[in-house]
Amino acid sequence: MSTNGNMARLIAVGNRINMAATRSEQAFVAELERVVGLAVPHLAADRPNLVVLTELLGLPAALNGWRGVLARQMKTGQGALTALAIAYGWRMRHYRRMYPGISLARALLLSLTDALYRPFHHTLARLASRHRCYLVATTCVPEVRRSTDPADIRRFGVRGLAEVYLPVGPAVYNAALLFGPDGTLIGRTNKVYLTASEKDMLDLSPGRLADVRAFTTAVGRLGIAISLDAFTPDYLRHLDALGVEIVVQPDANDQPWAAPSATHPWQPQEWLNAVLGSVQAEYPHLRYNICAMQTGNFFDIVFDGQSSITAKSARAPDPARNFVGNEGFYHTGTGVPFTGDILAVAPWVAEDPGRADPTLSLAERRQRLRRVTAELIPGGRRANQYRESVIWADITAGDGSALANAASQ
């Protein structure tokens, strides 16, 4: 690949969860190929490309195959976990004997190690190599070891294959994998700051902040901040101390988007705390944030949001580029105004009604948007009719200059 100076292209793919990908490993692999394929028309031929996929992209693989038949028929995420526990009961007993005291949820995820890691890793490595791009996405897995022992494959893998991936300890992480343009796994980052659902429902393990590293690439110096990590000042200060230029933020917000969050009256306003908050002057090295947002209803769990790419700047952001229902640019915790450029933002299902009618009050704008949210959630009139999006921006690493564009399906 030839390069044009220090220019690089950032591409965020906000896919919609496809429940059809839960049927089989082949269906899951085909879905990964489809999702990466959304970015392919926007790849630059004359500069390195970084394609950022969403958080929890590997989750549907947990339901693949005959063991997931009952789970796929459930109406709730908790019901699906219970059905999977029945199907993987003997493996769970094995891991509970190996690691006394672990929870049932942890034992289940350990039992799913090969299903959650092998097709995810192999497929994304192949696609990164095929398209000659850097590629980032996340799944829930322990640290793994590869085994070619026929006994291990027979007990924990897929018969007929020559390998199986096994956990090397009892911890299971929300992990982001970074692949290079030659398909090699450059590195992995485990999420440090977990949400309540990650702790209570899945019993995931927090990563160690000291283990979070920077990755030097042809795109720039990358640091991965999975969702809540990108909202956390300690985490951002750590990335900044490592000399990170580009904050890579895979995300899967498990709350309705155009609605209050657990901690603020309007979630899209709060989301600026990460995507703009990470490129403020207090973090001198952090120049860009690229956030890829998952959408879709996964059983009764709602994922929604707008992907974005932002850049450090001393200017006030352009009011024409903002998340729906927002009023200005400021940190919702401190009230401090944000500077910076929103290079690209994905459209939501509905346009902010304030664009068509500037006389509408903030309360009326948000009320209309909340009505759309109610239609999208499970049981709603337009249930699961979320948009998929692809946004991109051309940047120059180190000087903050950028061009941007966006596309959506």
Image (cartoon, rainbow, N blue to C red):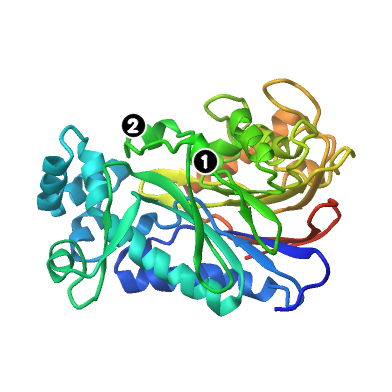
Q: Which mark is residue 374?
A: 1
- Which quadrant of the rendered structure holds the N terminus? bottom right
Q: Which mark is residue 203?
A: none
Is 128 on the left or on the right of 352, as rendered? left
Determine whether 207 is above or below 67 in the image.
above
Left or right of residue 398, residue 379 in this image: left
Location of the C terminus by quadrant is: bottom right
User: Looking at the image, is mark 2 or mark 1 earlier in the sequence?
Assistant: 2
Q: Dot 2 corresponds to which residue?
A: 200
Residue at 36% of width from left, 71% of height from top?
Answer: 27
The picture places residue 66, in percent across and down from the top left corner, at: 19, 65
Other residues around mark 1 within 10 Å, as few (<14) / some (14–19) / many (≥20): some
Q: Residues within 10 Å of mark 2 (few under 14, many from 20)?
A: few
Residue 238 position in % (x across, y down): 62, 35
Seen in the image, is 121 located left or right of residue 25?
right
**285 or 409, nearer to the observer:** 285
Residue at disc 2, secondary structure: helix
Q: Is residue 51 above or below residue 339?
A: below
Residue at 54% over, 36% down: 228
Residue furthest toward the top?
A: 334
The quarter of the picture where residue 389 lies is: bottom right
Q: Position of residue 149 (x, y in %)?
A: 18, 68
Q: Residue at x 72, y 48 (%)?
A: 245
Q: Report if residue 347 is visible in the image.
A: no
Disc 2 residue type (three-letter): Asp
